[in-house]
Amino acid sequence: MDNNFKTLLGTELPVIQAPMAGVQNSALAIAVSNAGGLGSLPCGMLSTEQIISELELMRANTNKPYNLNFFCHTVQPFDELRQKQWQTRLRPFFSELDSEFDESKKGSSRVPFSHEVADAIEAFAPPFISFHFGLPEPSLLKRVKAWGAKVVSSATTVEEALWLDENGVDGIIAQGNEGGGHRGMFLTNDITTQLSMACLVSQIVDKVSVPVIAAGGIVDRNTVKSAFALGASAVQVGTAYLLCKEALTSDLHRTAIKSSRASHTALTNVFSGKPARGIVNRAMIELGYMSELAPSFPYASIEMAQLRSLAEQRGLDDFSPLWCGQNTRGCKEVSAAELTLSLVD
C-alpha cells in the first residue's frame, strides 16, 4: 500500500464507503467519514431539495471529507409500446396481490447529473464526487473540477478504465463483477465482459495514470490486503455496511442477507433495466435474470416499485431488489465506525 489515497481521498484511511441508493442517507456517510474513511452520499435518486437537506446535515455533523455520488446515464425516450409489454408480463403478479398497476406513472426517480444539480451543490464545494455509468458531458465535468473537487468514476472493463483516464478523472473505481448493486457499465451492455475484482484491478493498474480503487467482494481486513497486493491505492466497500446500525436496509433485506439465501446472488435487469447484483428472489427467477422484456433504465422500475410495495406490505421480498455482493462474510450488525476501523490496520 502506498499513500496515493491520501492525496486522492484526503482521508486517514484508504476506505470509501460505497454509495448505496435506497438503503442509506447521510447518517451512514457521516459515521464513516468521522471514523477516518470517505463516507458517500448517493444522490441519483434524490431531488435537489433532498440533496441540499442531506448536505446541510453533512456539514453540521462532520468536518471530514465526504463523497457525493451521481448517475451519468443517457436518458432514453419513454417507449409506450415496450412499457405496455412489460405491464402485460407483470399483470399476473398484480392480480395475485389483488391490485392493478398505475398506468399514469411514466417517470422515474433516477436522474442523471445536470447543471441544475450542480447549481444546487456548488455552494457546498463538495470535496469529492464519484460518478456511475461514465462521466457527465465535458462542460459539467469542467465545472465540477473548477470547484476543486476530486472526481472518480466506475470502470467495469479495461476499456472503460482507459476511457476514464483519457477523459480527466482523478481516480478509477475498478468495479469487480462480484460487487452488489448496479454495474457501472457504460461502453458495453454485454455482461460477459465483466471481470472479477482481482482480474480487473490487476489489468488496469499498469495501464492508467491515476490511482485505482478496488471494489467488489471487499468486506474485511484480508480482502483489503489482497486488493492492495494487486496494486490498488484504496478500496470501496458496500455490502459489508448493509447491516450497520446507520444503514436504512429494510428488515426484509437484512433477513435475506443473514440467511443462507445470501450465498446465491445474480445479475439482473428486471428491477431497473440495467444489470445489478442482488440476492436471488422470485422476480429474478420467474421473469428471467436478464429479461429482454424489461424496459430500458430506469423505466423498468416504474411497475416493479409498485409490485415491491404491495408485496412488502404482506411481508414478502418477492419483488424487492435485494442488492448484495457475493461476499457477505463481513456483514455485521455493528456501527459503521467499528466496521470501518476493522478494515485496515
Image: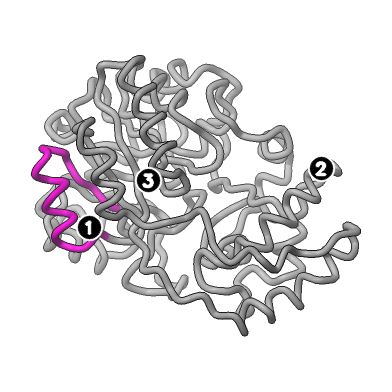
Q: 202 and 250: which one is in front?
A: 250
Can you name the residue that lies furthest to the front here? 104
Q: 59 and 67: which one is in front?
A: 59
Q: Residue at x 76, y 70 (%)?
A: 90
Would you identify the image quadrant in which residue 62 lies? top left
Which residue is identified by label 3? 215
Name the front one of labels 1 and 2. 2
Q: Is residue 214 above or below residue 97?
A: above
Residue 132: x and y, percent? Answer: 35, 54
First along the sequence among labels 1 and 2: 1
For residue 66, the mark is: none
The magenta stretch is 135-153
Would you identify the image quadrant in which residue 232 lies? top left
Q: Residue at x 47, y 55 (%)?
A: 110
For residue 204, the mark is: 1
Which residue is identified by label 2? 313
